[in-house]
Image (cartoon, coloured by chain):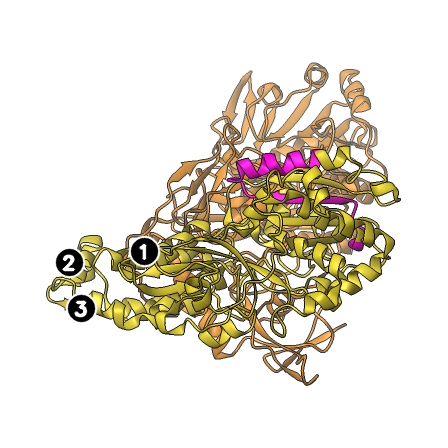
Chain colours: A yellow, B orange
């Protein structure tokens, strides 16, 4: 497995890579100059031609998204999604930390293409250090005439602001993010209207992930054909894969999307295998919302389409977590369920109540008071609270149900074995403690 | 009119409404919580989900979409086809009902909402009998959120109707959602109680028992309540309301939907005005003044006393010594009975409408909005029927009512010797000029609600009943003639105003406001020929 020549990560590790000086020395802002010579529509055309798919999780083609903007609009906003709240994901964070000017250049090209005059970087609350790095870079770019009025001497003008979140996973959802920037509770909006038509402050709005925006810079710099030459059909371009868990070399790796999970974990160019004494039990390959792979499914290619063959919801953020054998699968289940119960915004009934219910079931199973029927219940809840096609306002409930169902289905025998190994009557005693009326004498009261 | 197909049935519907509203209008029982026609759509309860026929993007053929769509959010399009009667829809309803009840305390036996609770009804119709959750329930705390309202957050289903009401109709935005996920709850902002003038509506629109009226709390089982259709007497807006009563007592007042007047709402002044019925300053028996002391008089003698006095005064000078002041608190029928009796006995009598209590200006909601955008208006005139009085005087006598100032001058100068002054104000009142002038009268009949200075000097005092104890009609500030029914009987010893006026006017039998209105119409008073009725709300809307 040949490692891809660094593209998005080309400035990683370079001394003072956050400064404008170093970025310029290494060829920065030439793509912007090139874009400004092209027409707006030409830039959009190039991105469309490159088939750039969103790196935030859903994989929606960015150029198509921009194409939804009404042609006769007066004001357009660009929101850069730097909420990066998907649990094991830390790719956007490194892009901001290591190369903030790459992001600024991407934002400027995107803003130029979409005729945006104001761009907001929505940054997750926990990014303190990253905020200061980013703000410093923006200030520097303002001073250099790269942001603000008369950018690079042209008539193109745009401002970039950083808006910091307050720590909610759901604010990474497009319309939750918009509400949050507007100063409201981060409750996703009902669609239609879609943000491209009526988004931030009711105006046409483009929302793209940090990594997507960074890719735009390279598409303009090297041309769409170069971009198309990287990676498999339908999943072109470089992609960052953060990998964590008990592996030799955790971190963020850049690769084309024909890389398999096995290569990412075991290849010498990537994570270099498991830590000594650890054995792989499963892998959550796309953040946590996309589902889990068993140890025998590691040939799954990390592109937008192949993952579906393995029962995953999609590529997601491409963040890989390796779950070792020594970790009880019940804890994995609990960790997943608890996260969504904590992060569901609570707007839609199924998601609000379903995530809370699943986390309580998972808690009880993890506490050693599970029942086999709880596993069926988990699957039923996860199916009825969302799943594709979604039933709720946003995709959180789909992403909350899928990994639970995935873990229960793929690790059913392990879970059943754990339940079988509980002391006799453990579940019954727990239920009686919770609800004394649940049992009457020896027989369970059943009313249907 | 667009036509859509719901469950295979063609339904004609109004333009610009949602599929859910069209289905409700057509009589379908579609469960819903967060949708309220008077509020914005949030589509968050996910109970009204339906199947819709859409164009398949690959084949271009019309096919049932594999995805459920919220019907409250979907605007109607002519020819569209939707269905609710499928296993997929029913399965979603069943699961949503189970979810909503997961953390609900199921304390129906002690819940005010029991009996009119949409959680109970939908659980019965669309839900399941048992919960499969064996884990501990999450219970949010119950809170006192304002002077009139309690919030039982363990019962809340997070439909956010109350939050939207405070933002969109009241315009005060006291309520908000705090916390996340299943720990979500409705709360007030710190230090800002729910105290706007429309806040009682949050109790009405709450589909469950989460928002509770302190005054009604644990007083009545709602299934024992009977309702009388009524009109609010507290301002000239005349909101369409219903009075819920049981065992001869009023327990609460609720708005009825009337798009022409109040929409779905009413203000707290009207909502809690029924306190006036139990005011201990009320006049509770008719009295005549004999030698300085007020003595109770038998109702059966009242008509004779009044007729005797007015006939005597009416014979002098063509009846010009008689003056009648009707009140904006009177019903049209009562005023007509009174004026028709006076006209017969004293043709030249002077008619006047007692001044209407006023505040500076109308209150418009949402607070701070322009009148054109108003969703609710509280009128500055704090009496229900000034326009009705003016119409009755004009149409019965052919003359406009005299000014109150002239009336006082005529009394004070002694040119009017016999007067009937009706008030019926639920607030203590007294015009010092009038009281001073009244000393010159030879004979004064006062018809009033509370003890007051005027009733202390009157020769004959006739108690007025509260509006809930009477029937009749008011004309509101838009000129709508609106009728109100009697809800409860007056206290022992009192007679409904209409009844004694009916007898004084020389009629026999039982007073019936509708029949009196017919007589008024027959007498050529066209305004009273038809009543503006509130349209019936769709059966399954709530």
Say if labels 3 and 2 share a chain: yes
Mark 2 burial class by Cα count in 10 Å: few <14, some 14-19, many 20+: some
Q: Residue at x 30, y 71 (%)?
A: A412
Q: Residue at x 58, y 79 (%)?
A: B7
Q: Position of residue B251 (x, y in %)?
A: 45, 43
What's the mark number on residue A429?
Answer: 2
Chain letter for mark 1, please: A
Dot 2 falls on a residue whose secondary structure is helix
Report the span colored magenta.
A113-139
- Contact flag, marks 1 and 3 (Cβ < 8 Å): no
Whole-number angstrom distance, CA of label 3 to CA of label 2: 15 Å
Q: Position of residue A368 (x, y in %)?
A: 20, 58
Give A123 or B210, whichever is nearer the viewer: A123
Dot 3 falls on a residue whose secondary structure is helix
Q: Sequence order check: which comes first, mark 1 or mark 2?
A: 1
What's the mark number on residue A420?
Answer: 3
């Amino acid at each position: 497995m040949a490692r891809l020549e660094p593209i998005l990560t080309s400035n990683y590790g370079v001394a003072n890579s956050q400064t404008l000086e170093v970025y310029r020395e290494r060829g920065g802002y030439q793509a912007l100059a090139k874009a400004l010579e092209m027409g707006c529509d030409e830039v959009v055309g190039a991105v469309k031609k490159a088939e750039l798919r969103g790196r935030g999780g859903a994989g929606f083609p960015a150029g198509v998204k921009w194409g939804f903007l009404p042609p006769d609009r007066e004001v357009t906003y660009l929101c850069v999604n730097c909420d990066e709240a998907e649990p094991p994901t830390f790719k956007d964070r490194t892009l901001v930390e290591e190369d903030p000017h790459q992001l600024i250049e991407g934002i400027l090209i995107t803003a130029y293409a979409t005729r945006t005059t104001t761009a907001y970087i929505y940054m997750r609350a926990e990014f303190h250090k990253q905020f200061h790095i980013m703000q410093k870079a923006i200030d520097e770019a303002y001073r250099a005439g790269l942001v603000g009025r008369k950018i690079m001497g042209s008539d193109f003008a745009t401002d970039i602001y950083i808006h910091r979140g307050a720590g909610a996973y759901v604010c990474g959802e497009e319309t939750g993010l918009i509400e949050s920037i507007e100063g409201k509770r981060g409750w996703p909006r009902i669609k239609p209207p879609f943000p491209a038509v009526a988004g931030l402050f009711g105006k046409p709005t483009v929302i793209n992930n940090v990594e997507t925006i960074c890719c735009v810079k390279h598409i303009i710099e090297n041309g769409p054909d170069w971009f198309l030459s990287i990676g498999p059909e339908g999943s072109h371009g470089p992609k960052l894969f953060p990998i964590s868990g008990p592996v030799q070399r955790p971190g963020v790796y850049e690769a084309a999307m024909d890389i398999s999970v096995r290569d990412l974990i075991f290849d010498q160019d990537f994570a270099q295998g498991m830590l000594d004494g650890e054995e792989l039990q499963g892998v959550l390959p796309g953040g946590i919302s996309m589902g889990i792979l068993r140890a025998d499914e590691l040939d799954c290619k990390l592109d937008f389409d192949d993952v579906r063959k393995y029962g995953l919801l999609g590529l997601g953020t491409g963040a890989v977590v390796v779950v070792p054998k020594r970790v009880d699968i019940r804890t994995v289940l609990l960790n997943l369920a608890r996260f969504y119960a904590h992060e569901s915004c609570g707007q839609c009934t199924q998601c609000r109540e379903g995530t809370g219910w699943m986390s309580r079931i998972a808690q009880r199973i993890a506490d050693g008071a599970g029942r086999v029927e709880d596993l069926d219940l988990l699957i039923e809840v996860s199916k009825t609270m969302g799943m594709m096609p979604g039933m709720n306002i946003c995709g959180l409930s789909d992403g909350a149900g899928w990994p639970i169902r995935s873990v229960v289905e793929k690790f059913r025998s392990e879970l059943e074995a754990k339940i079988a190994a509980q002391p006799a009557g453990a579940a019954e005693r727990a239920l009686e403690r919770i609800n004394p009326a649940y049992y009457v004498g020896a027989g369970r009261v059943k009313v249907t | 009119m667009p036509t859509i197909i719901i469950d295979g049935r063609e339904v004609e519907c109004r333009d610009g409404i949602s599929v859910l509203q069209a289905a409700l209008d057509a009589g379908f029982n579609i469960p819903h919580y967060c949708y309220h026609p008077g509020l914005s759509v949030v589509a968050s309860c996910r109970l009204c989900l339906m199947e819709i026929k859409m164009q398949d993007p690959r084949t271009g053929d019309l096919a049932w979409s594999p995805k459920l769509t919220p019907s409250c959010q979907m605007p109607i399009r002519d020819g569209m086809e939707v269905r609710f009667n499928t296993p997929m829809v029913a399965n979603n309803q069943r699961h949503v009902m189970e979810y909503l009840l997961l953390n609900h305390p199921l304390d129906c036996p002690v819940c005010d909402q029991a009996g009119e609770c949409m959680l109970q009804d939908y659980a019965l119709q669309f839900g399941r009998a048992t919960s499969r959750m064996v884990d501990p329930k999450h219970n949010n705390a119950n809170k006192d959120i304002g002077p009139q309202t309690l919030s039982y957050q363990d019962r809340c289903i997070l439909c956010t109707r109350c939050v939207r009401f405070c933002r969109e109709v009241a315009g005060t935005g006291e309520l908000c959602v705090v916390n996340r996920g299943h720990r979500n709850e409705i709360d007030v902002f710190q230090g800002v109680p729910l105290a706007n003038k429309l806040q009682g509506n949050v109790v009405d629109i709450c589909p469950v028992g989460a928002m509770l009226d302190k005054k009604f709390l644990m007083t009545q089982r709602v299934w024992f309540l009977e309702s009388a259709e009524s009109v609010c007497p507290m301002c000239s807006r005349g909101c369409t309301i219903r009075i819920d009563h049981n065992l001869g007592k009023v327990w609460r007042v609720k708005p009825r939907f009337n798009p022409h007047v109040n929409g779905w709402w009413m203000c707290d002044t009207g909502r809690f005005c029924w306190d006036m019925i139990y005011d201990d300053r009320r006049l509770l028996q008719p009295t005549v003044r004999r030698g300085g002391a007020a003595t109770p008089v038998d109702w059966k003698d009242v008509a004779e006393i009044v007729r005797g006095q007015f006939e005597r005064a009416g014979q002098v000078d063509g009846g010009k010594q008689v003056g009648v002041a009707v009140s904006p608190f009177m019903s049209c029928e009562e005023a007509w009975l009174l004026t028709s009796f006076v006209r017969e006995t004293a043709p030249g009598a002077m008619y006047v409408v007692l001044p209407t209590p006023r505040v500076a200006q109308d209150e418009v909601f949402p607070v701070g909005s322009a009148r054109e955008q108003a969703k609710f208006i509280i009128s500055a005139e704090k009496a229900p029927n000034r326009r009705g009085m003016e119409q009755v005087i004009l149409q019965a006598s052919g003359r406009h009512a005299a000014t109150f100032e002239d009336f006082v001058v005529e009394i004070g100068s002694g040119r009017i010797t016999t007067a009937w002054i009706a008030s019926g104000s639920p607030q203590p009142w007294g015009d010092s000029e009038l009281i001073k002038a009244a000393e010159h009268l030879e004979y004064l009949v006062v018809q009033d609600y509370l003890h007051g200075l005027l009733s202390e000097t009157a020769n004959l005092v006739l108690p007025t009943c509260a509006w809930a104890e009477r029937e009749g009609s008011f004309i509101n500030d838009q000129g709508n003639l609106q009728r109100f029914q009697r809800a409860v009987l007056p206290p022992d010893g009192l007679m409904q105003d209409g009844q004694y006026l009916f007898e004084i006017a020389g009629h026999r039998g039982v007073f019936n406001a509708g029949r009196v209105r017919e007589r008024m119409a027959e007498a050529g008073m066209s305004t009273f020929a038809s009543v503006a009725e509130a349209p019936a709300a769709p059966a399954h809307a709530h």
